[in-house]
Image (cartoon, coloured by chain):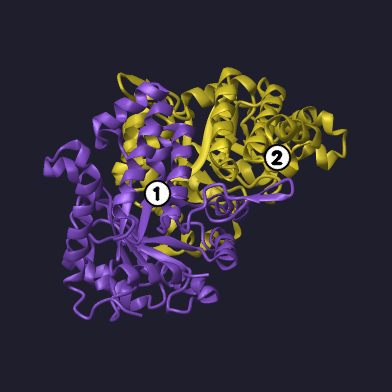
Chain colours: A yellow, B purple
Amino acid sequence: MSFDKLISRIVETQNPTVAGLDPKLEYIPSYIVQKNFEEYGCNLRGASRAILEYNEALIDALCDIVPAVKPQCAYYEAFGYHGMKALYKTIEYAKSKGMYVITDGKRNDIGSTMEAYAIAHLGTTQVGDDRIEAFGGDALTVNGYLGTDGIAPLIDICKERDKGVFVLCKTSNKSSGELQDRLIDGKPVYRIMGEMCEKWGESAMGELGYSAVGAVVGATYPEQLAELRAAMPHTFFLVPGYGAQGGGAKDVIGAFDAKGLGAIVNSSRGILCAWQKEGCDEHDFAQAARREALRMKQDITQHLTGGIHL
Amino acid sequence: MSFDKLISRIVETQNPTVAGLDPKLEYIPSYIVQKNFEEYGCNLRGASRAILEYNEALIDALCDIVPAVKPQCAYYEAFGYHGMKALYKTIEYAKSKGMYVITDGKRNDIGSTMEAYAIAHLGTTQVGDDRIEAFGGDALTVNGYLGTDGIAPLIDICKERDKGVFVLCKTSNKSSGELQDRLIDGKPVYRIMGEMCEKWGESAMGELGYSAVGAVVGATYPEQLAELRAAMPHTFFLVPGYGAQGGGAKDVIGAFDAKGLGAIVNSSRGILCAWQKEGCDEHDFAQAARREALRMKQDITQHLTGGIHL
């Protein structure tokens, strides 16, 4: 009922990073795209099969060195229900390789509907006498704009099935401050949301100091990251914005606690497009992703001078 | 590039309501569920086929009297990619019957990712030389917590393809005030979000007085509904919370302008479960939904004493 499983994987791999699987067709080597178009058609189905083949090769190349993957739902939804099948199969494959899966959906709704999202992404759906995993992720990103009603159904499932959620606090994008930095009783909205995360997490504490309710805090705002780390001692952070969005290794250091824990840093395009950036043979894309993942690990952990330990 | 199409349908049907298609298996007559389990298996596929058959019958019974449907993504995602296929087919069928489709996904993300959501739900996905609709809705509900970056890609597609978005302002659930009622410079967060909606809509004004950027404002908060109507003269409202959630006809009247326009009121469970509430034969479920939709239309329009007109 917490992030203990994720934390254990981070300690095991000594790597507090997650590979974002945000596949666009233009990131995928053309031989994979062409092969799948020929086999399944130049349509949403063929494209989705290409995405799955690409993801599986990346997972093979990363699973022993990176603790987690973060598929971003939007990039699968863009290929319709075929894309959602590729999302399901990607999650299934990553889990079969021992990876922790954070489904990045930023879902949010009123309680009754949020229960359906919680079931969809972290729980099981009742069909006849069976309960079936619809997507089967380990954690889900969510948006807390609707307050406690929209978070409570998730916490129930987190407790029941050892899952986690990450609530958006301070996002990595340029305009995040338009609402998130505005002051309520002298505190920015992201702090208010952070306080709500700490409160929501109280009933779902893990053994390793963090609750099942994490937060999304962008690498592009290093000061706020450090401020929130201090203000939210029981909240595990998912940190986007490293790499392509402009965040550097020094920017994310404030997200970690004294044990080198408390945060996982995401890179999507940096890893996915490493082969294009390197200019290597497209058949070498998965190894290029591995090289970039190792570079990123080294880049970040060099600043965690006390190491990563329980 | 606006809600003109929706407004025209509302005037045509003289009905400012939308039927929420939030299918749970327990809402569906057992003969439909059993038939599909027998044909496709007692699994996510069979369940999704039952949902689609149920939705199509409801659409047939409602399409000449209700201007729009609002499928709620969560209830489809709960059935995995098979559920997402049912969502796609439901949208396709509703459009073939002339209905306006509001996809209720409350999506949100940074700009680059929001572009993928915009493509998925309102746009077309490039595959080879073709552009294909992934889900094909007419409008999408979204969450503005990330600010302008997360809304701009939607507006581009709204302009290009005559689509709309509804941004969450004041949601219908009990805990919506935890963040949304807090004051920023003396104004509640929902007002700040409302001001952002008015601003976002400026570049996408329709011919009929409303922009392509609408807002979600709950029927359960009638005072705020009237306050926001006055403060947001160019923003079309999607009003959830009528019926099962406790909002009555008098509560929603403040959402309308002097022409009886400016808002569309949603009912999901009230319509979907009408046959259970009536206690009628389960084979009569679609006609029970129609009776409830007509009752709701009458219930609301009796208070629009000036009628609904352009």
Task: First in sequence, mark 1 or 2: give its number.
Answer: 2
Image side of residue B129 versus residue B201, left or right: right
Residue B204 sits above or below residue A118 on the image: below
Q: Quadrant of residue A297?
A: top right
Report which residue position mark 1 lands on. Answer: A144
Mark 2 — on which chain does it sit?
Answer: A
Helix, strand or loop for disc 2: loop
Helix, strand or loop for disc 1: loop
In the rendered structure, which amino acid carries the disc numbered 2? Cys
Image side of residue A35 versus residue A137, left or right: right
| Residue situated in front as seen by the camera: B97 or A169 | B97
Name the residue: 72% across, 37% down: A271
Callout 1–callout 2 Cβ contact below 8 Å: no
In the rendered structure, which amino acid carries the disc numbered 1? Gly
Q: Quadrant of the C terminus of chain B?
A: bottom left
Q: Quadrant of residue B267?
A: bottom left
Q: Residue furthest left?
A: B279
| Residue situated in front as seen by the camera: B292 or A282 | B292
Mark 1 or mark 2, whichever is nearer to me: 2
Name the residue: 32% across, 65% down: B264
Do the residues at discs 1 and 2 belong to one chain? Answer: yes
Report which residue position mark 2 lands on. Answer: A42
Residue B275 visible from this viewpoint: yes
Find residue B270 and report its horizontal and vertical position in percent: 21, 50
Q: Which mark is residue A256?
A: none
- Estimate the spatial distance between the alpha carbons at disc 1 and disc 2, rounded to whole Å: 39 Å
